[in-house]
Amino acid sequence: MTSLPTAFEWRMCTKHPGLVSESFCVKCRRAFCHSCSKIASHGPTCPICGDFCGATREQEEAETLAQLRSRSMWREIRVIARYPLVDIQSYVILGVSVALLNAIPVMGWLLGLGLLAAYGLHAMARVSVGDLSDFQPHFDSIADDLFGPAFLAICATFISAAPHLAWQIFLSPPSMSGLIQEGHPLSTLIAILCWVWQVGYFPMALIVAGESKSCLDTMNPWKGFQLIPRMGSIYWETMAIVFVLNGARLVFVPLLGMLPLPFLGTLAGAFVSAFVFLSTGCTLGFAIRKRAPEMGLE
């Protein structure tokens, strides 16, 4: 981004104030519309001093990005909440498809998770580069666009829940369960720590999964630990938003499944899940975009 002097109107042409500028010269403090611009082989140059000019569009994009990165995640809540509705057709297709897959015994649930994960990780990738126009994956390859994201989502879920699973396995032998009862203070403390890990690390596991597309990297907490300090408060704000979204899903989907009308509860729950996965992807995409330089992605 070009460093601009204060009180310099570079968005509108200096000679033709009614026309939007295409370039500007910091040295001369003048902006130029299309008819005033001078284009050389290496780009726009000032027709007055011959110095290299900054491009207005690039400057606007850089300033917009700088403003985005200066805001907290809380300022993006309204955009996140509306994000699943930017492409109504794709949202409806996703909800109906997940509902139909969930009606298939056993494997249907896994396929539905794969579809949700594919859309969620795709949304994260799009938003992380500033594209909020749509979230429809291309599905050129079922293995890469459906089963790949599903597997990465399972890996992210597993590494987040691993301490809790390990603790349950530790307590399962009678000798151990007798040594540390379920209501014992130590057992309660460890259970709380496992829960904190699961809630706190899950967003980072998804970020690592989406950026690396590697199961080994997703299952390696050190990858995430390296990024959390670099993201600063943005990560903790992201964690809170993702926690609320997925907490709402865990509450509403079972309740909707209890509706007496056949398939209606499953369909409504599928739309809730689609909304949550897309909003989660949008949230993580915003977090990456805000902290891309610190994460080494730019």
Image (cartoon, grey):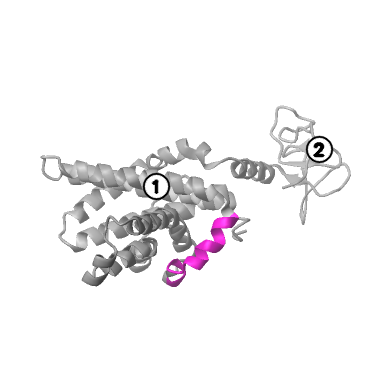
Q: Amino acid at mark 1?
A: Phe
Q: Amino acid at mark 2?
A: Pro
The 10 Å Cα crowd at callout 2, few under 14, some 14 to 19, many 20 or more, is few
> Percent x, y for residue 52?
81, 49
Task: Identify the element where label 1 is drawn.
Answer: helix
- Residue 149 seen: no
> Percent x, y for residue 156?
39, 62
Left-right relation of 44 to 261: right
> Percent x, y for residue 143?
34, 68
C-alpha separation, residue under disc 2 versus residue under disc 1: 43 Å
Instruction: Choose the circle earlier in sequence order: 2 or 1.
Output: 2
Is 225 one of the magenta-colored residues? yes
For disc 1, the marked residue is 243
Q: Nearer the viewer, mark 2 or mark 1?
A: 1
Q: Is residue 117 above or below residue 77?
A: below
The residue lying at 20 percent from left, 41 percent from top is 256
